[in-house]
Every structure is written in C-alpha cells, then in structure tokens.
Image (cartoon, rainbow, N blue to C red):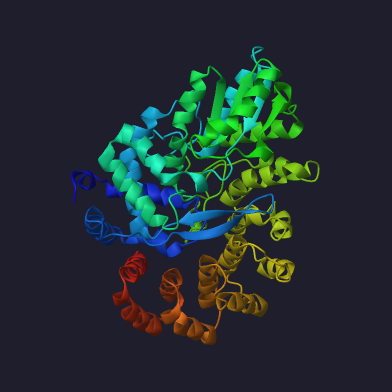
Amino acid sequence: MTDIFKTFNFEVALERILIDTLSDFVFIPQFSDIYQHATKSLISLTKKKLSDLVSDLYTPQPPIIIEVAKPNGLTRPGASLFPIDRLIYQCLADKLVNFIEKEIDRSIVFSHQLSKDRDHNGMFLPPGKCYKDLKDELRNLLDDSEYNYVLRSDVHSYFENINLHDYQSLLNESAGEKLSNFLHNFLKGLNTRNSRGLLQGIQPSDLLGNFYLTSFDHQIKGLRIKYLRYVDDMFFFFKEKEDALHFRASLPSLLRNFNLTVNESKTTVINTSELYEEETEIDKLFANAKEQIEEELEHQEIDFYGTEILSEEPETFNEEVSLDLIAIKQLVDLIPVYPQKTDKILSFALPKLALKKDDYALRTVIGSFSKKPHLAKSFANYLAHLGQERDFKKEFVERTIQDKFFYPSQHMWYFTLLRYLRSEDSRALSLAADFYHNRNNSHSARGAACLYLVRCGGPKERKRIRESYSTESELVKTYIVYSTSDFPDDEKRALQATWAGQSDINKLIIESIKNKDKK
C-alpha cells in the first residue's frame, strides 16, 4: 500500500458516508447498516482492495443507478456504490478536499461549502445554507446600480459530460500526479463505457463536480465580468444589454474548451428587476418560518432544507424538541393560493412536520403521492414517521393502488413506505410480487419490493424470493440477504449460514444484522 493510502482516515470517511446516505437517491438499508454495524470488517476488506488498486488488479463494482423523476417529467441518474467502493471514493475525496478548496474562489462559487464544525463530520454545509449565501450575494448585486442585466445559464447534462482525462490534467496541477492518477483509474473503473461522467448523488462527486469549472471561473474573472456560480448554474452581470447579448454569443465556445455544452433552453438575458419576483406573503412566511425554526432547533441535527432518507429506526427523531409549527402550517395552508409553490412548500415543511409526527399535511401528501413522483422520497419519509402513531395505511393503499407509476424511484419509495407501514393489503403485495419477479425492472426498486414482500407477505412469497437468489444480480442478492432479518428464526439462521460464505458483501451484511440484533 502506498504512503497515500496509509494516511486514509477510514473512520472519518465512514462518518461522512453515514451523513451522506441521508440524502441518497437509492434506498439500500443493507449498506447503511454495514457502515454502522460492521465497520471494522469493512475497513479491513477495503485495505485489501486498496492493495489491489496499487497493482491495477482492483476494479470497482458497477455503480448502482436509478432513474430519479424530475419536476419536469424527465429523469436524471441517481447513483450509489457498493460499500468498499464508496469508502475508497470518500477517502480519495478526503485526501483531495484541501487541494481542491484552495483552487475555488469562494467570492464566486457558493455550492458545496466545506463544513468547519469539528463536532459534525459531514463534508459540506447544508445545501440550503449554501444557496442562501448565493441568494444574499445576488440581492447585493441587484441593489448595485452598476448592473442592469443578468445572463443566466447552466451546462447541459453537466455531471454526465465531465471529461475524466481533462479532469486528471486539471487535478495534476493542484494535487499532484500520483493522487490524481489513482483517482482517474478509480473513476475509469466506475465508468467503463467511456471517459466521461461523474456519478450523481454522492458527496465525493459533488466535490469533484464543483472543482471542474474552476479554470472557467478564472477565465471569466480575467475578462472582468462579474459572475456567480452554484455548481453549474451561472449568473453573469452587465451594465448594458448589448454586452450581455455579446457574451451570450461567446459562451458556447468558452464552454467547448472544457468539452461542455451550454444548456440553450436555460440560457437567457433578463433585466435585473426580473431576477427576483416581488416579495409576497408566502416569501415572508418562508423567511419567518426559517428564522423561527433555526432559533428553536439551534442544537438539533436536522437539515432545514431537505429530508433525510428513511432510516431503519424512524423513532430516533427527538420527540422532546420544542418546535412551534404555526408558521409551517401557515405555509401548507397557502398551497391552494400559490399552487406553483407547492413543491417548495412541501419540501420545506414535511421534514419539520415529521419531526413532531404532526399529521397536518397528511391528506395533501396522500393525494399528491402519485401526482408528484419527484417528491416520492419526501412523501415516504413523512408518512413513515407519521405512521408510527396514525393508522392510515388502508386509506393510502386505496388512494394509490390503481395509479400508474412511471418512474423506478417512485416504485422504490412506494414499496419502502408500504414496508414501514406493514401493509398486508393483498393488492399491494400482489403488485410488489409482480414488480419483483419482472427482471426488466430497476434492481434497486425490485430490492425495495423484496424487502416489503418478506416482511409483510406470507411463506409462499418468502419461498419464491429465497429460490430466486441464485439467479439474481449481485445487488438484488444483497437485498435478499438483508431480508433474512424478517424470516422466521430457524430459516433465518440457516439462510445466513449458507449465504455468508458466498461473498464478502454477504458476510458484511450478515455481520451487521447480528451486531445490530445484539444492540
């Protein structure tokens, strides 16, 4: 093992991964349990794999990809990794972070600001805090009479089109050839089809994606153009409209220097007065609610601007926390008045209502579950926490069982929620069985269906899943192994004894199950 690998801090990397899993696109509870309950074995296996990486014998397993619904009806690829690969990727990112941060001009770039809280090992500040900093700077510039026009733009399919060879050359200059070569080989192993693309949805990729445009930042700064960036969302400020239009014409060629393409549909010149709509009642309520909650939850672990992934123990939410939900409920009440703000209201309000297991948005969420697939995770998280004290599973199934789900991510969160609610509805179980046994479906969504069927189905369905194990993909096998925790004790012990010796990942999953049971 090289000197670089010897300095990896696996424990810190694992703490960062655990925080990162809260915002994962993919529901893989078996891997989250490994990070918590089989850490020593995971680190030991990872060190062995790193020795193979040095000698070019190590190849990462294929990334876990699920198509995640977007508000516009399209999808983006959300990704995760098998535990050893994710730990290596996080360790590499941790080694690179200081080199990368030195190259980022924080007067320009507001995305993925590093956390400096020594008591909190997350890599970045909450995204809402970073975005607020961007909005504050935008407001400062809009108040400056020097600028009358803004060119807004972003990069078409940014993460998918990052050129890994260019990235290696860029990183050589700041981090050194040895470390950049290791990263390049690792990324190439993850992306065997071509030399482009970073995985979306995990924080090492967020770090790397934030860095790729730093040369572009310096180039724009050299042109003496006032400019702000949030990942690949860009704002260019001009006094005269003609200057903005002239720069817009040159922007595509500037980005082509980095093998990137401008997103034409999102590139527009607007008057600075149009950048922010006039503050409305709802904007004031958002501001009041955020201020109130941040004061009351100053020392609580909660992301104010998103929702955490469903944990295996949702009851770990602190029920004693003091939280006045009046402002939150006022926001929910405004959904009929401002329907265009529905997504923003729900994304902000649901984690706080879940924290107190408050059912104020119950009817809204049940009625919107099928209509808003891009919010399926937020809806599932809220309903799962609420379901500990409210029995609404019959109503939920009745309202959704006949609906057509078109997105793998929506199916995944639907089956995950049914598992938490312990729904034994025969129609829901039949739907899950049909979905699981169709191998054309997303593997991670099929995995969620598997976990639901084993927990809430009967012996017949458990038998079919058990018998499917030998012909399944490596990922689905991990869900089946994890599902043994819901098998009857004798069968559970027999299956775990059989499957533990078949792969390292099986061994880690079963070890984590046993260690978790001891606790």
Image quarter hosting the C terminus? bottom left
**What residue appears at the point 45 percent right and 31 percent down from the top-left corner?**
214
**What residue appears at the point 71 percent right and 26 percent down from the top-left corner?**
270
- Decide which of 488, 172 is in the foreground and name it: 172
- Decide which of 246, 110 is in the foreground and name it: 246
**x and y percentages locating residue 173 in the rendered image:** 32, 32
**x and y percentages locating residue 8 in the rendered image:** 25, 46
**x and y percentages locating residue 462 in the rendered image:** 50, 82
**What residue appears at the point 52 percent right and 23 percent down from the top-left corner?**
220
Q: Residue furthest right?
A: 337
User: Which quarter of the picture shows residue 477?
Assistant: bottom left
**x and y percentages locating residue 395 in the rendered image:** 71, 67
Vertical relation: 463 (above or below) 121: below
- The total of numbered circles placed on residues is 0
- Decide which of 518, 312 is in the foreground and name it: 312
**What residue appears at the point 45 percent right and 33 percent down from the top-left corner?**
113
Residue 230 seen in this snapshot? no
Vertical relation: 385 (above or below) 105: below
Residue 470 seen in this snapshot? yes
User: Which quarter of the picture shows residue 119?
Assistant: top left
Q: Residue furthest top?
A: 145
- Decide which of 492, 108 is in the foreground and name it: 108
Vertical relation: 109 (above or below) 438: above
